[in-house]
Image (spheres, coloured by chain):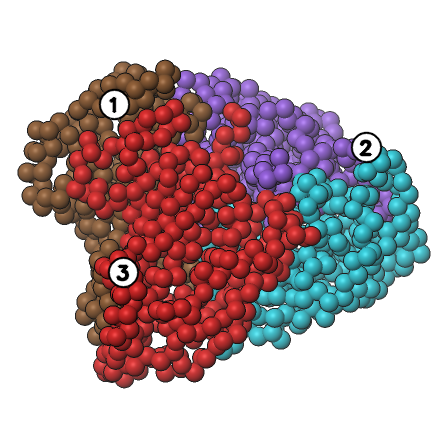
Chain colours: A cyan, B purple, C red, D brown
Amino acid sequence: MSIYGESHGNGLGVLIDGCPAGISISEQDFEYDTSRRRGGGFGTTPRQEPDRVEIISGVYKGKSSGAPILLSFANLNVRSDDYKKLANIPRPSHADFVAKEKFSGFNDPRGGGQFSGRMTLAIVACGVIAKKILSGVNFSAKVLEVGANTNIEEAIEEAVAEKDSVGGIVECRIKGHGIGIGEPFFDSLESCISHLVFSIPGVKAIEFGAGFAFSMMKGSKANDLIISMDGKTKTNNSGGINGGISNGNEIVFRVTVKAPSSIAQSQQTMNMETGKMVELEIGGRHDLCITLRFPVILEAAAAIALADLQLINKVNKKIND
Amino acid sequence: MSIYGESHGNGLGVLIDGCPAGISISEQDFEYDTSRRRGGGFGTTPRQEPDRVEIISGVYKGKSSGAPILLSFANLNVRSDDYKKLANIPRPSHADFVAKEKFSGFNDPRGGGQFSGRMTLAIVACGVIAKKILSGVNFSAKVLEVGANTNIEEAIEEAVAEKDSVGGIVECRIKGHGIGIGEPFFDSLESCISHLVFSIPGVKAIEFGAGFAFSMMKGSKANDLIISMDGKTKTNNSGGINGGISNGNEIVFRVTVKAPSSIAQSQQTMNMETGKMVELEIGGRHDLCITLRFPVILEAAAAIALADLQLINKVNKKIND
Amino acid sequence: MSIYGESHGNGLGVLIDGCPAGISISEQDFEYDTSRRRGGGFGTTPRQEPDRVEIISGVYKGKSSGAPILLSFANLNVRSDDYKKLANIPRPSHADFVAKEKFSGFNDPRGGGQFSGRMTLAIVACGVIAKKILSGVNFSAKVLEVGANTNIEEAIEEAVAEKDSVGGIVECRIKGHGIGIGEPFFDSLESCISHLVFSIPGVKAIEFGAGFAFSMMKGSKANDLIISMDGKTKTNNSGGINGGISNGNEIVFRVTVKAPSSIAQSQQTMNMETGKMVELEIGGRHDLCITLRFPVILEAAAAIALADLQLINKVNKKIND
Amino acid sequence: MSIYGESHGNGLGVLIDGCPAGISISEQDFEYDTSRRRGGGFGTTPRQEPDRVEIISGVYKGKSSGAPILLSFANLNVRSDDYKKLANIPRPSHADFVAKEKFSGFNDPRGGGQFSGRMTLAIVACGVIAKKILSGVNFSAKVLEVGANTNIEEAIEEAVAEKDSVGGIVECRIKGHGIGIGEPFFDSLESCISHLVFSIPGVKAIEFGAGFAFSMMKGSKANDLIISMDGKTKTNNSGGINGGISNGNEIVFRVTVKAPSSIAQSQQTMNMETGKMVELEIGGRHDLCITLRFPVILEAAAAIALADLQLINKVNKKIND
C-alpha cells in the first residue's frame, strides 16, 4: 500500500500491490465504509465530499486481475483561501511547523496537505480490499468515550458550547482470524497494527488486551488459562496475542485520539516571520471530535496489517501443509 | 538490523547493515548498556551470563568499515532440562502455544527459543551502535512504577512473598535530536518507535506525551503553544512529536510491561496431548519483574528507530542543503 | 517507484515516494522524453496516444513538496476488440500464456494488460524526475544496430517487406555521476540497473563495459590502468564500474532487445480450450521494431537506479563529511 | 538473506530469515556445494580453507525451526601481510580504489575485504537452503568456454604460461520449477536472477535463452511455438521466461566472467599518495580463472531468486486455490 494526495489538491488515493487475483471488487463495495468515515454529522467537519471511489486499474470484469490496484478520490469541496494566512503562523500542536521545517518550506500547507485527516480516506479504501482478502474475519470498532464521558452526545455538546474540541477512546475487536498470525522478531501483530495506527493523525496511545492495566496486575491474575485444545482461554487479558502472534482468541485493542488542534477559540502562537507572539483565529472547516470518525479507520488499519501478516504466515507454513 | 539466535541455543546476535563508515566501535563500548540489561539483581532471573559481545565483522582498526557488522553473544549458562516437560503443556499467556502452532511443532521450545526475553540483548547491542550514529542525542529511561506502586523495592518484595510476578511502567525521554525526524505517511516517529517496542516480549501498551490522558483533554488544554522561532513549546503534551515528526522538543513515551507469565505459583493449563487440564509447576529461572530490565532496552529501541529515520530525513533534505 | 495501469484500461502511471522537496517539476518537463518514446514513426506501432502527463499530487507551486508524486496518463486510443479472440489462443513468445496461468485467468488480456510495452511510459515519466534529482549527470542512449545491420532504416524496410519483426542492440552511456555509487553486497550498480532493465518487456541480455567480450580477454588486456588521482582510467573495459561501484569513468552498458512477438505473418499456436494447434493471424497495432523506442527507456531505467543509489550513498558518507 | 564478513577477518556467513519450518538441515548438507566452490585445483587460488559450515541458529533437532538461520564460516588460512602495501596503490580494475573512496579510507583492504570473491561462499551456503526449499527443482551449471576456447584445460595452461589470468562463460539450466514464477512489473524472473548474479565479483554480462543472438533474429524465427496444453514449446529461445514469468520450459542463462584483475605480470598503476605512476607486482594468492568456480555459485544465486519468487507466487494464488 502506498498513498498519495493532499487535502486541497486534485485528489488522493491508494496504490495496492500484491492483491491476489480473482477477488470481486466493485465501486459499490466501498460505499459502506467510506460513508461511515465521512464527516458532516454532529461533531464533525461541515466540509462535505461525496468520496466516490474510482477504480483506475487492477480490476477486470469485476475481479482483481493480479495487477496493481489504483483507487482514486477527487477533492471537490475545496476552499483553500482559509489556509493562506497560516503559512507563517503555525497552529499549536498541528503539523504546520514540522512540515515547513522538514520540507524547507516547499510543503503544501493547504488543509494540512499530506498531513490532513482526509488522507485516512485512502486507508479506509485499502481496508475494504483487505477485508475482502480476509474473508471470514470480522472487524468491529466503536467509540468508548469522549472527553472521559461515556455519554458521547453530551460530551460533544459541551465542547460545542465551549468553542473547543475534545478527544476520546476507540476500541477495535477482531474475530475469526485463526492462530499464528504475526512474525517474530520484528513484525509482531502488535508491532504491525500499531505501526499503521500511529500513522493516523491524532493517535497518541494504543493498548492491547488489558493494556495499561497490566502495570497494576500480578502474573497470577494477568495470565490467561488455556481451556481448550484450540487455544481458547478463560480470560483474554492478552487481547488475543501472545509472543506477538495471534492465539485464536478475540483480538482487542484501544486507541486514544487527541482533541483536534484546530479550535474555534482564539489561541496564541509564534509568527515565524516576525518572531512575535500573535493571536490566532483559525478559519476553515474542522472536526471538533475526530474520534467519531475513527471506528472504520481503525478497522481498516487492523485489516491491512492482518491481511499482510496472514499472507506471510501462509508462506511460512508451506512446507508442512 | 536482523537478529538471530535462541535462548538455549549456541548464542544470539544481530547483523547491522548500513552503518556509516568511520565510527569508533570497540567491544568495551557495549559493556555499560549490556550490564544495565543483565539479570541477577533483586527481582530478576538468577541465570547469570557474562553477555560479552564479539565483533565478528564490519569493524577494522577500531572503526566501522562500511561493511555489515555482526555482533555475537554466546549462551553459556544453559539448563535446558528445565523446559523439556513444557513441550506439550503450554504455560498460560506465554508464546509456547502459538509457537508450536505457527511452526507446526518444529520450533525450539527451550527457554522460549526465539521468543525469549534474552533476545533483547541483541537489541541492546544494536542500540549501542545506533546511539553512536546519533552523536549528541541523549537517551534516558527509567522505571516509573511497579504493580501500581512507585516504591519499586516494596512492590518487588510483595511479589516475592506471594510467589507471584508483577508488571510496571517505564518511561523514555530523548533530547538533542532536532526537528523533522519521521516520514509521512506510514513511517511516523510514533509508528517506528512503537513497531520496535512492541517486538519486545512483555510490552502491551505505549503512549506518547500526554498519551491516554488525551482522551480526557479538550483541545484548548491539549495544544502546546509555540514560544520560540526554533519550535520550543510552553507545554509538551505532544511528547515532542506533531504529525508524526519530531518538533525539536523532548520526545517522551511510556510503555506498560506485563508481569512475566512464568510464576512460582502452581497454575492450571491444558495438556495438549491428552486434552485434559493439568496442574503446572514451572521450573527454570525467571524474572519476576522484567520491567526492571526495560530502561536500557527501550533506549535501544528508540535509538534504532531514530537513527534509521534520521538518515532518511537527511536524504530528503539533500536538494535544499 | 510503483507503477499501475494496463494497456487498454483507464490509464497508467507511476507513484514516486521519497523525492526530495524543492525540485522544479512542470508538465512541460515530460514532453521531450515522452515524445522520444512515442510510437508512430517508421517501424513503430500506428497506435497514436498524446501521452500527456497529469501531475496529480506531490507538486505545489511548481516544486516537489516532499509528498508522494502521482503521475498519470490516460489511455485514449483503445481498440480492445482486436484482442478478444486471443483469450484462449496465446501468441507465441508473448506473456499471454503465463499471465493466464499465473493469475488463474483473471488477468486483463487486452493489449497485454499490465505486460504491455505501453507500461514503459510510466518508467520514462519516472526517469524524468530521476534525471532532475541527478542534476549534472548526463544520459545518452542510442540504437547501435537492428537485425545485425548498422543501417537501421534498411533493416526495418527488410522486416516490413517480410511481414516480420526484428530485434536490435541499444547502448546507454552516463557521465558526470561521481565515484562511489552502488552498495555491496547485493545492490551493486550493475545489479540495480539490470534489475530495472530486465523489467522492460523485450530485454533478453545486458552487458557492462566490454561485456561478453570479457570471456575472450586475458587479465593483462582487460585491466584498466588508473592514470589520475581521481580514478580516470586509460581504457574503460570495466564500463565505469568496479566491485559493483562507480569509479568515476563513463558508465557504459548495452542491451539486446528481441523482435516483438506479434508479427503480421501467420503463425501456429495451441488453442487452450480445444487442445488443438491452430493458425493465428494477429490483428491489433504493433511495433515491428520496439528497439527503436528503447533509448529513452534505458536512460530512464538507468537514471532511476542511479538516483536511488546516489541517495543511499550520501547516507553512508554522512559521518565523514 | 543478509551476508557478513571479510576475506581476512574472523570469518563470514549468511543470515537467512523466512525459511519455512520443518526442512531437514544438517552441516553435512553443505559439503557437496561448498567443495564444488572451493579453490585449490588447477587454475584456482592456492589458498586452502576447509570451509566447514557452522549452523549457529534456526535449526532444532535437525530441522528448520522457523527462526532465522545463521550459517557461519571461519577464516583460517589468512596472510594479510600480502595486502599491506596495496592500501595506497590500487590494483587496476579491482575494487581497491572505489572501496577506499566510498568508505573514506575506513574500508578493510585485506584480501579485498567485503569485496572478496570469498564472500561467494556465503551465497553458496544460502543456495543449499534455497535448493532444499525448492524440492523437485533441478539446477545444473557448467563452464562453456575459457578465453574463447572450449578446451578449458588448454586455455588455463596458456594463461599460466603467460603469467596472465583469463575470463570465460558459464551456463546455468533449471528444470522442474513450474509455471508462473516472477512478479510483474519490477520483479521479473530475469530481474531477480540478474540482480543476484551481478552481485558476484567478476560478472560483466548475462543473457537469457538466445540472449545476445536475439539482436540478429526476426520475430518469425525467434518466437517459440506452444505445442502442448501445459505450455511446452517447440524451440526455447525465450530461455523458459516470457513477460518476466517462467513458462514451464527449461530456464537457461549464460554469464560472462572477466579475468581476475590480480595477475602475476607486473602492471602500472597510480600511487594515490604521491600521484605518480608506479610498477605494481601483486603478491597474495589468486585465482587465474575464477570462472572455474562459478557453476555452483550461479546455481546458488538462481536458487535463491527462485525460492523467493516461488513463495511470493504462492501467496498471489491463494484466493483461487
Q: Amino acid at mark 3?
A: Asn
Query: Along the horizontal axis of the image, is C243 left or right of B181?
Result: left
Nearer the camera: disc 1 or disc 2: 1
Return the residue at label 2.
B228
Vertically, is B53 above or below C77? above
Tell me whether circle 2 and circle 3 mark residues in contact (CB < 8 Å). no
Q: Amino acid at mark 1?
A: Gln
Q: Which mark is residue A176?
A: none
Residue D60 image point, x, y percent: 34, 41
Camera-nearest residue between B65 and C302: C302
Query: Along the horizontal axis of the image, is A151 left or right of B90?
Result: right
Does mark 3 fall on the same chain as mark 2? no
The residue lying at 93 percent from left, 53 percent from top is A162
Q: Secondary structure at mark 2?
A: loop
The residue lying at 50 percent from left, 40 percent from top is C136
Vertically, is D33 above or below D73? below
Nearer the camera: disc 2 or disc 3: 3
Return the residue at label 1.
D268
Return the residue at label 3.
C151
Vertically, is D114 above or below D123? above
Residue C267 image point, x, y percent: 24, 78
Tell me whether circle 1 and circle 3 mark residues in contact (CB < 8 Å). no
Q: Amino acid at mark 2?
A: Ser
Q: In which quarter of the view is residue A248 placed? A: bottom right
Residue B290 image point, x, y percent: 59, 32
Residue D118 image point, x, y percent: 27, 32
